[in-house]
Image: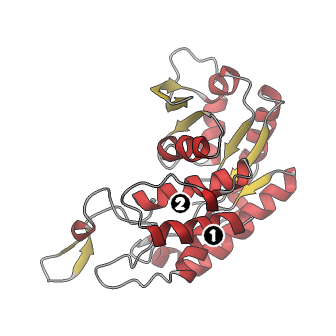
Amino acid sequence: SICLLQHLPQVAADRGVELDLASLYIGGCSLSNHWANVLRDGEKGFRPYLLGRNRFGKYMQGKANVCEALRMEKWDIVTVQQASHESWKPETYHPYGDRLIAKIRELAPQARIYVQETWSYTPWDKRLAEWGLSQEEMYGRLHGAYAGFAQRYGIAIIPFGTAVQTWRRLLPVKYTENSFGGDVVGGGKQDERDNFKRDVNGKWVPNCDVFHLGRRGEYFQALVWAAKLFDAAVKELDYKPDYVTDDEAKLMKEIAGEVR
């Protein structure tokens, strides 16, 4: 997840861990598409992923393919995830996820493999209605799908989708006609007052992203990853960006330390 490049190194450094962190990114890339890209390994000039890397505090960016990235270093950890729009459908994890796990074990046998549990969408995302799912139902289905996939291969889950759902329940998040109600999902990088606008009929409509993490969510994600991957005591963490309040950070740290 490319958004981790900003906060995870700083969270880890606060807990005494130095990271060499790399991310391969194609927006909305499913396990089936990842596998299709693996099959083109060695094809001249085929480097379809944005490669972001934060190597011990130094950021760099380039292009790469899956196998090249796996061979780049002797990674301690490799993570995978399903595209969020397919995450709630267990049948989409096979056979391509199976093949991807096998390829990781072939090219990075020393690495521990984790799967990140992605999150359910905000009610503003029209796909929920198209799928006939509520936010809670999407979460329940993706939670079960990730659990089944992880159990099949004996790999651990980074339970970020569960952390988001816990945040929504405990805050609690209260959506209104022109607000995400405190959710860590949805919203752009701009002032929250610009997230919604009125259409020609006077109805409030989103003027921003409605299913990716907002900037507070990106910090929350780093806390959950650090707690899971490094067993970091995030409750004692000092690092916090200015746009996260003390109360928000406190709740995020509590959730990150408890979800497993």
Please tell me in which quadrant of the rendered image residue 190 appears.
bottom left
Instruction: Please indicate, yes or no, whether residue 132 appears anywhere in the rendered image.
Output: no
Q: How crowded is mark 1: few (under 14 residues within 10 Å), some or many (20 or more)?
A: many
Q: In the image, residue 243 lies at what x, y percent?
A: 36, 60
> Relative to 153, is 199 above or below?
below
- Tell which circle, 2 or 1, labels the residue nearer the N-terminal end: 2
Neighbour tally class for label 2: few under 14, some 14-19, many 20 plus, Cα within 10 Å: many
What's the residue at 74%, 24% (across, down)? 74
Cα distance in 3D space between marks 2 and 1: 9 Å
Q: Is mark 2 on a helix, strand or loop?
A: helix
Q: In which quarter of the image is the C terminus?
A: bottom right
Which mark identifies residue 220?
2
Say left or right for 177 vs 216.
left
- The disc at residue 6 is none
The image shows residue 140 at horizontal and vertical percentages of 67, 76
Question: Tags 2 and 1 in contact by the CB under 8 Å rule?
Answer: yes
* Nearer to us in this view, 211 or 97: 211
Q: How many labels does the image show?
A: 2
Would residue 80 be found to the left or right of residue 249 on screen? right
| Amino acid type shown at disc 2 | Phe
Q: In this view, does 104 lie above or below 196?
A: above
Q: Which residue is drawn at 74% across and 48% down?
A: 114
Image location (x, y in percent) of residue 102:
81, 37
Quarter of the image where one finds residue 78:
top right
Residue name at image x 41 percent, y 63 percent: 244
Q: Which of 32 and 113 is in front in this view?
A: 113
Instruction: Give residue 177's position: percent from left, percent from top.
Output: 30, 84
Left or right placement of residue 189 versus residue 97 in this view? left
What type is the residue that disc 1 sits on?
Answer: Ile
Which residue matches tag 1?
A: 255
Visible residue check, residue 27: yes
